[in-house]
């Protein structure tokens, strides 16, 4: 989220698209209701199903799963056509006027630079014309046909309301009603907020779904302002934190990246990370990358990381492929390329696409370790549970360790919420039986491995033997000590230009501006610097006061970065530093500095006249309508069909789906066609349950006890399916047998002249816990991900449905 | 535990004496359920089960989001869902939290033959006192909203207490506190009525011309009220009664027969007492239900 | 005396009786003592501040446990409700959060390490030492065998791809940092979290 949960109340229009906030985030959704009641806001919901969010909306438009980009590109076209953009904002705070290279182009569904064989783009043409000093050329009058806004206008021109409706199935009248309402927020003092979640990410074009809306928000001048922003509603209590700390195949804490095989030396690695400003005078904050990575290596390896060994650069593993994500991991398992797997609080047999493939993969492992408070399906994948897990244990040679862990109520620590708040929590009770904390278990594994390497030697033991682990109780480090590690400390006396000591050796740092690239500071996660200072644990703060009741609560817990609550908040003010919306200012220029209710996302003394752009992380200093080379599948978003789609791509039949989607050969062989599987399946959560956990909680099992699918009345009638009766839903990869909920909330959509039916598949049931046994929605879903992030395409795939008799099959 | 609230009773089942009421300045409370901001998330059901230590059996999916399928002795509140197409052909998903309405003039209390089994506090809450309940089921028949349910386990009648245990220590009911969207609010009846008017104004501005407050006069108003977008059609909200009132049978019984029925009462009370002491949880036979129905029907006929 | 409910209804039905026990001389006081609201169950429970474990709204919660943390009292969580001071949830909780008590006390909470041998059809309880010693052994053997120190071009790459790890989504940030350190010190690259599912 760029903004806070409470800030949603400041919106004039709220759009929920690619998410179902009322059901997945009910307590955050209260701020939408607050916006409606206290701010007269209108709520718009665009969703394949009429959800519980839609039940309290002012406007609802149905859409075929996987066609959001068409819908939103149509919106961009509408805004440009009606001139409903926030001109001053777009001119000064976006890269609309920058001039794109002549070599960039788009034709027949492909951007310039496509390599058919490798299925990747050479992205070098997706960039700006540079002048002699290396700055991007700009035409602020927007006359040059090569400037971003004109190329964008040209790109979206094909997305007429007729075309959008033909692709998405959204009736034109509904489409235009939504467009018209959203356009009202182009006024400088009006804000649209966008709430989305995995309804956008879980597509082969997931990242571009989000990008398209971000472009809309830039055009409307809604980023950085109160009641605006792009608000990704994260799904799990600390998934923001785990992402921040870089628990991803290619990351280092604080959005730093592991090196690749090509970056043979530290200087090679740094070369692509200089982030020189693309326009004069811009901040381009990533220029400080070296400070962050060196301080990180000092936290990780202490005195063993020196300038002589390039800060232990070679102790970091290098990547030969962009990502070792989950889809690749299970492909490797199935190919026999993996022997061991550790699942910490994670249940892949339920959570990953193509359940059959997951089960086969786990069966090929030599050992599987699960760490969880609950008895997960994954830890019992080898056990026969009837049709819901039809395996023969004697044929599975995997050694399985099921390790019991503490849960939230039994440990101290911080969680990072969707609004980037680090909130501390306290232990209330001892865990049951002999359950242990994850920290204790990870420490136990580490110490045993280190001991074995000390005794026996073995493959490259250096990082194992030299990693810093100087905690008071090394067998179970105190969370407070780990938090201080991440915050960072001075390793020597830090001095300012006059020679005065600013931070004494050993003291905790106050902010990441104090980090150095010479090995004199250590910080395990630079974006968290300031969370635990000499003043104490800032994450444990509990002052809920809220200046002007604008939803900031600056002294409640602590937010990264630098306790800033609204990202890009410089953009909430005009060129002269006056709030676009005088009713709801965030920061303003008082003649000497930036002041207000939030920490400025800007150097506090930078004068408005200095022309420093508000998007300080971008080399241009402005928001990106044109993404340069940051996206693997295009600098502008384009509509591509799902990997499993009921339709042709009417825009460019030859390039039907995302041309750079990574698809493994055996997965491609498991894609179905619409002749065999004529309906579009989509998976989702229900509000009564949280993933696969709450089926272990009796109350939630009572509230929603049994697996079902949602089917529209028209299709049910056609197929003779009764309300509450049994059905068999199948895809090329498997089938589930469950009850049917025949509903008015899903209606057939007319797509390219043909009726298209959507079948909703809630995902919560498995074979352990208190609820009734279920097959699991992931039995049906395809193993393919977003081209940028490899997030699985859970939201749109092909299925068939038939009346059935029961699960005894 | 001592009876902390007996002095605050204003009504007590099967009792002619007016309970002592030295305290005469108790504010009336009310729960306001704003159906138009309810998302049907069932947090109220969850919190109700958790707070009141109730866990009905895990059921089945039966063609609706409604679960459990009905109110019960362990289900004191329940979200009811109706997919309704309005005059324009647009879908409205009408979701109503069902449960005890805490009537100002409670039909259950009037119908109850067991002394002190049903009480009404000065703040308006209607509470069932299990110790005194004889499980006869008259409250079920006397309730215009079909709320109380008899437990198969202990043969006593149960329903929402409006969390009288929380309210008595100055807290709001559990469902109110938990409601994520503020669709359930709690306060004095006058504050809730005022707030409802604000909501109705907003709804009218959004095109719901018939928005209104449900506080039915047939039971002299309720301490649980609804804001409805279509107050002209309560029945579209999963059969919310259009004009609830206490059945003529109950009124007849309480009004005319009571003074001459003292002898009968002695036996009733004793029967209930012995029933509880000697039999413990007993079995309800279908014949019993049928017999009760028959008696009630015949009694209602004069109407 | 064995009055069935049916018999009871018949008797009362014939007399249609309803009136005051008090009027007939039954004492009011005894009835009144029984007629009481349920005692407020949190009167002296210990309150601990925490954060809901489910979604990322991160609602503040208050955990109530039995016992006052005296040496001889083992805390047992008896109730969880929303923290009214929390700026986001302001005391509210969704159906999952309001039912947190049942996940803390789920009958399927794990209590001891368990091990399943190759081809076996059952778990057996094992000691922590057995489990962790065996895991470390398996990991080290696999790492020593399959660690890639240099790629085909001779570049130092120091990665381990044949054992992977999925990190959690509800463990603390501090846990995730400790996990990151251990995983990367081993050179593991098949490493992911729940951000995508």
Image (cartoon, coloured by chain):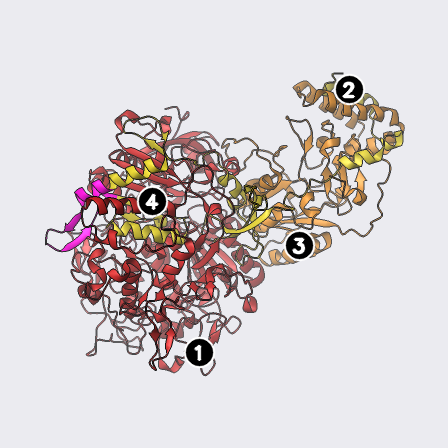
Q: Which chain is yellow?
A: C
Residue at 28 percent of width and 61 percent of height? A302
Q: Which span is picked out in magenta?
A: C140-163
Give the CA distance from mark 3 to mark 4.
Answer: 59 Å
Which residue bears the numbered disc 2?
Answer: C10
Q: Quick check: is B295 in the magenta stretch? A: no
Q: Which chain is red?
A: A
Please give the chain letter of the residue carrying mark 3: B
Q: Is A493 left, or right, of C58 in this rendering? A: left
The disc placed on residue A577 is 1
Compared to A47, does A514 lie above or below?
A: below
Give the CA distance from mark 2 to mark 1.
Answer: 84 Å
Label 3 with label 4: CB-CB less than 8 Å = no
Q: Position of residue C90 (x, y in %)?
A: 56, 55
Disc 4 on helix, strand or loop? helix
Q: Nearer the viewer, residue C177 or A768?
A: C177
Which residue bears the numbered disc 3?
Answer: B196
């Amino acid at each position: 989220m760029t903004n806070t949960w409470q800030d949603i109340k400041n919106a004039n229009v709220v759009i929920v698209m690619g998410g179902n906030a009322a059901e997945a985030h009910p307590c955050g959704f209260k701020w939408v209701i607050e916006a409606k009641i206290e701010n007269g806001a209108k709520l718009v919901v665009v969703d394949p199903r009429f959800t519980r969010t839609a039940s309290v909306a002012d406007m609802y438009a149905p859409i075929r799963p996987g066609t959001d980009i068409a819908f939103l590109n149509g919106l961009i076209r509408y805004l440009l056509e009606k001139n409903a953009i926030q001109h001053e904002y777009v001119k000064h705070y976006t890269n609309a006027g920058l001039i794109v290279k002549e070599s960039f182009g788009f034709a027949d569904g492909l951007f310039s630079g496509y390599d058919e064989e490798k299925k990747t783009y050479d992205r070098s043409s997706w960039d700006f014309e540079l002048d002699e000093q290396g700055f991007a050329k700009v035409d602020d009058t927007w006359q040059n046909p090569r400037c971003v806004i004109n190329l964008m206008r040209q790109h979206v021109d094909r997305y007429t309301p007729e075309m959008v409706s033909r692709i998405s199935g959204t009736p034109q009248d509904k489409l235009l009603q939504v467009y018209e309402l959203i356009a009202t927020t182009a006024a400088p003092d009006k804000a649209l907020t966008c709430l989305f979640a995995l309804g956008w990410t879980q597509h082969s074009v997931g990242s571009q779904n989000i990008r398209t809306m971000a472009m809309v928000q830039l055009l409307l001048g809604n980023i950085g302002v109160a009641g605006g922003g792009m608000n990704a509603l994260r799904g799990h209590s600390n998934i923001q934190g785990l992402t921040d700390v870089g628990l991803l195949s290619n990351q280092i804490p604080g959005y730093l990246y592991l090196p690749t095989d090509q970056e043979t030396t530290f200087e090679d690695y740094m070369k692509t990370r200089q982030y020189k400003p693309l326009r004069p005078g811009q901040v381009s904050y990533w220029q400080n990358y070296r400070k962050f990575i060196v301080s990180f290596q000092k936290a990780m390896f202490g005195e063993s990381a020196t300038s002589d060994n390039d800060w232990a650069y070679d102790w970091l593993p290098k990547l030969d492929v962009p990502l070792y994500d989950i889809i690749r991991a299970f492909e490797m398992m199935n190919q026999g390329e993996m022997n061991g797997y550790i699942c910490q609080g994670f249940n892949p047999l339920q959570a990953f696409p193509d359940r059959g493939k997951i089960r086969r993969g786990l069966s090929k492992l030599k050992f599987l370790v699960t760490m969880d408070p609950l008895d997960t399906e994954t830890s019992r994948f080898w056990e026969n549970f009837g049709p819901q897990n039809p395996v023969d244990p004697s044929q599975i040679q995997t050694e399985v360790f099921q390790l019991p862990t503490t849960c939230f109520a039994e440990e101290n620590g911080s969680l990072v919420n969707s609004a980037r708040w680090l909130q501390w929590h306290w232990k209330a009770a001892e865990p049951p039986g002999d359950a242990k904390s994850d920290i204790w278990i990870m420490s136990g594994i580490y110490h045993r491995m280190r001991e074995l390497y000390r005794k026996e030697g073995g493959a490259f033991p250096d990082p194992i033997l030299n990693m810093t682990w100087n905690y008071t109780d090394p067998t179970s480090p105190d969370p407070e000590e780990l938090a201080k590690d991440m915050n960072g400390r001075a390793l020597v006396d830090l001095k300012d230009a006059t020679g005065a000591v600013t931070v004494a050796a050993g003291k905790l740092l106050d902010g990441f501006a104090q980090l150095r690239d010479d090995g004199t500071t250590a910080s395990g996660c630079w974006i968290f610097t300031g969370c635990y200072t000499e003043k104490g644990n800032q994450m444990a703060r509990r002052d809920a006061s809220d200046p002007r009741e604008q939803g900031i609560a600056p002294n409640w817990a602590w937010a990264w970065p630098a306790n800033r609550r609204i990202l890009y908040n410089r953009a909430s003010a005009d060129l002269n530093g006056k709030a676009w919306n005088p009713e709801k200012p965030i920061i303003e220029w008082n003649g000497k500095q930036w002041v207000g209710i939030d920490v400025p996302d800007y150097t506090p003394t930078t004068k408005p006249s200095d022309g420093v752009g508000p998007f300080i992380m971008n080399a241009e200093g402005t928001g990106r309508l044109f993404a340069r080379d940051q996206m693997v599948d295009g600098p502008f978003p384009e509509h591509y069909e799902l990997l499993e789609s009921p339709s042709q791509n009417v825009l460019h039949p030859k390039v039907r789906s995302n041309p750079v989607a990574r698809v493994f050969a055996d997965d491609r062989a498991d894609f179905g066609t619409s002749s065999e599987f004529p309906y579009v399946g989509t998976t989702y959560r229900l509000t009564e349950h949280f993933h696969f956990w709450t089926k272990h909680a009796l109350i939630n099992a009572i509230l929603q006890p049994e697996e079902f699918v949602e089917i529209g009345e028209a299709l049910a009638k056609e197929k003779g399916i009764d309300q509450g009766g049994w059905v068999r839903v199948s895809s090329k990869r498997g089938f589930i047998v469950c009850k049917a909920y025949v509903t008015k909330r899903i209606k057939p959509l007319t797509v390219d002249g043909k009726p298209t039916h959507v079948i909703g598949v809630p995902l919560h049931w498995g074979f352990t816990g208190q609820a009734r046994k279920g097959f699991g929605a992931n039995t049906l879903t395809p193993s393919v991900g977003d081209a940028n992030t490899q997030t699985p395409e859970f939201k749109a795939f092909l299925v068939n449905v038939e009346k059935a008799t029961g699960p005894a099959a | 535990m001592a009876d902390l609230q007996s002095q605050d009773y204003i009504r007590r089942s099967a009792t002619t004496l007016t309970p002592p009421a030295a305290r005469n300045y108790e504010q009336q409370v009310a729960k306001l359920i704003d159906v138009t901001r309810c998302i049907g998330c069932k947090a109220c059901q969850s919190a109700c089960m958790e707070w009141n230590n109730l866990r009905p059996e895990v059921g089945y999916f039966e063609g609706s989001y409604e679960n459990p399928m009905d109110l019960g002795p362990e289900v004191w509140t329940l979200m009811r869902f109706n997919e309704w197409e309005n005059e324009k052909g647009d879908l409205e998903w009408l979701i109503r939290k069902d449960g005890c309405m805490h009537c100002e003039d409670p039909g259950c209390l009037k119908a109850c033959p067991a002394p002190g089994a049903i009480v009404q506090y000065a703040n308006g809450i209607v509470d069932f006192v299990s110790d005194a309940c004889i499980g006869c089921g008259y409250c079920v028949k006397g309730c215009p909203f079909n709320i109380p349910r008899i437990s198969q386990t202990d043969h006593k009648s149960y329903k929402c207490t409006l969390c009288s245990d929380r309210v008595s220590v100055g807290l709001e009911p559990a469902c109110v506190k938990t409601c994520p969207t503020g669709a359930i609010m709690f306060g004095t009846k006058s504050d809730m009525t005022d707030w409802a008017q604000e909501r109705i104004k907003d709804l009218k501005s959004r095109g719901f011309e018939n928005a209104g407050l449900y506080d039915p006069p047939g039971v002299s108003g309720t301490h649980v009220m609804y804001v409805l977008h279509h107050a002209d059609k309560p029945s579209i909200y999963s059969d919310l009664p259009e004009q609830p009132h206490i059945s003529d049978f109950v009124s007849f019984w309480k009004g005319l027969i009571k003074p001459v029925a003292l002898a009968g009462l002695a036996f009733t009370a004793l029967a209930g007492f012995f029933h509880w002491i000697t039999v413990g949880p007993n079995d309800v036979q279908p014949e019993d239900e049928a017999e009760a129905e028959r008696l009630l029907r015949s009694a209602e006929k004069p109407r | 005396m064995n009055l069935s409910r049916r018999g009871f209804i018949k008797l009362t039905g014939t007399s249609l009786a309803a009136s005051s026990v008090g009027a007939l001389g039954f004492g009011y006081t005894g009835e009144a003592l029984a007629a009481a609201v349920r005692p407020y169950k949190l009167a002296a429970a210990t309150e601990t501040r925490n954060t809901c474990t489910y979604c990322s709204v991160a609602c503040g919660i208050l955990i109530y446990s039995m016992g006052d943390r005296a040496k001889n009292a083992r805390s047992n969580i008896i109730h969880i409700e929303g923290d009214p001071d929390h700026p986001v949830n302001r005391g509210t909780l969704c159906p999952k959060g309001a039912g947190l008590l049942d996940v803390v006390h789920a009958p399927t909470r794990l209590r001891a390490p368990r091990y399943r041998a190759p081809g076996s059809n059952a778990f057996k309880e094992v000691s922590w030492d057995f489990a962790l010693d065996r895991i470390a052994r398996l990991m080290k053997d696999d790492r020593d065998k399959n660690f890639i120190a240099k790629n085909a071009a001779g570049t130092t790459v120091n990665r381990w791809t044949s054992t992977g790890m999925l990190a959690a989504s509800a463990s603390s940030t501090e846990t995730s940092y400790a996990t990151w350190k251990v995983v990367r010190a081993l050179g593991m690259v098949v490493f992911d979290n729940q951000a995508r599912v």
